[in-house]
Structures are given as structure tokens and as C-alpha cells.
Image (cartoon, rainbow, N blue to C red):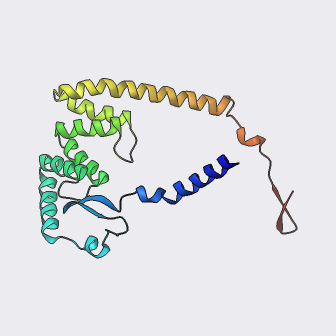
Amino acid sequence: MKRLLLLGALLVSSAAFADDDKPSTIRICDNTGCSDRPRNTATFEAELAAQADPAQDAKVAALEAMAEKDPRAAYDLGLRYFRGDGVKQDSYLAIKWMREAGERGDFKAAQALGRFYLFGLEEMGSDPAEAEHWLMMAADKGDKEAKKLLVKARKAKDQAQKDYQVREADRKNGWLAGWYTTYTYRTYWRQGRWYYY
């Protein structure tokens, strides 16, 4: 009995002091540097985040104007959007500008797009067929790395097609076929309203 009381007292006392192990500060790193700040502070300031930087906006607008005319600038802008270097990181705009550069013959942009599509980019999954398209463009320009990646893209595309065929066959003919037909309804319509069985 004493052991149980002692064990209970030990558990209660350890639970009471469990929060004391947490440090009162947390390390935060942002554009101003790193610092230790109290745990209970809020760091986001909506007013500052909403303010535009006219100088930065002018730089981005000038680079976009260059990118409209020169595929090298389009590649550079796409890379900046991908990395978030001088602009807000945006994978959609990164791909948009990389595609602009690749479609106008920049083989480094085609290679980068091939990588994006082969391995996936942030929320976007991989697309081996699209990767093959872009890597072929870069490989045709003599890019050795694109040739190596092209082999991987073709294997991934073939595997994706095989996986799709297996899933379709199971969906149509396998144990997955008509799975929903075995479930019963819980309600029925009668006299202008729904009733439960």
C-alpha cells in the first residue's frame, strides 16, 4: 500500500513539474536575423506584411519586362521565383517563367523544367511525361545531364502507365469493381420527406 501511495505521489509531483523543463524563450530567425524571444509573443504584423516595397516592385517589373524579350531573363526570373530570391517564393510563377524561357530555346530552363516535372515541385507531384518532353528538348541541345535524366523520366513514365493499367483493371474487373453496390441506403423518401430505415 505504501508503494502505491509513494508511486502516486511521485507521478503527481512529476506531472506538476513537467512544464518547468521548457525554456521560456524560443529561437526565431527572420529577415532581421536570429534572436531568442519569449514563447508567448506574436511575431506576425499584418500591417507590415501588407505594405508593398516600391523599390522591390520596380526591380521585379523591370526583370519581367526583360523576361518578355529575352529567354535568359525569363530563366533568371523563374529561378528567382523558385528560390524566393528578391521576390516572394511562388512555384506557379517559377514554372510560368521557366516555360517561357524553355519554349524560346533556353536549354537550361528546359533542363530545370524536366527536373521540376520529374521529381515534383512543392505541392505539384511528378509528371514523367511532361518531364520527358522538356528533357528531350535539353538533350537535343547536347545537355549531358538532361540525357541521363531523360532515361529516368522514360522509366518513370512507363511505370506510371503500367500502374495506371493495373488500377484500371482492378477498378473494372477486380475486387474493387462495384464495391459501392454492396452498401445499403439508410434513408428513403416517402410522403414528401426523408425517413430512416
Relative vertical location of residue 78 with respect to residue 135 in this rendering, above or below: below
Residue 18 image offset from top left, x and y in percent: 48, 56
Q: Is residue 160 above or below residue 102?
A: above
Residue at horizontal 23 percent and vertical 29 percent from the top: 146
In the picture, measured across the screen, residue 137 lies left or right of residue 63, that is right
Residue 13 percent location from the top left of the image: 54, 57
- Compared with 81, 113 (above or below) is above
Residue 95 on image: x %, y %: 28, 48
Please provide percent x and percent y for residue 85. Answer: 18, 54
Query: Which residue lies most toward the front here?
Result: 2
Quarter of the image containing the C terminus?
Answer: bottom right
Please give the count of numbered marks on the rendered protein: 0
Q: Relative to 48, does residue 122 appear above or below in the rendering? A: above
Query: In the depicted view, which residue is nearer to us: 181 or 90?
Result: 90
Residue 22, quarter of the rendered image? bottom left
Residue, x 12% and y 49% (percent of image)?
70
Q: State left or right for residue 81 relative to residue 187.
A: left
Residue located at (12% from left, 53% from top): 69
Locate residue 30: give its quadrant.
Answer: bottom left
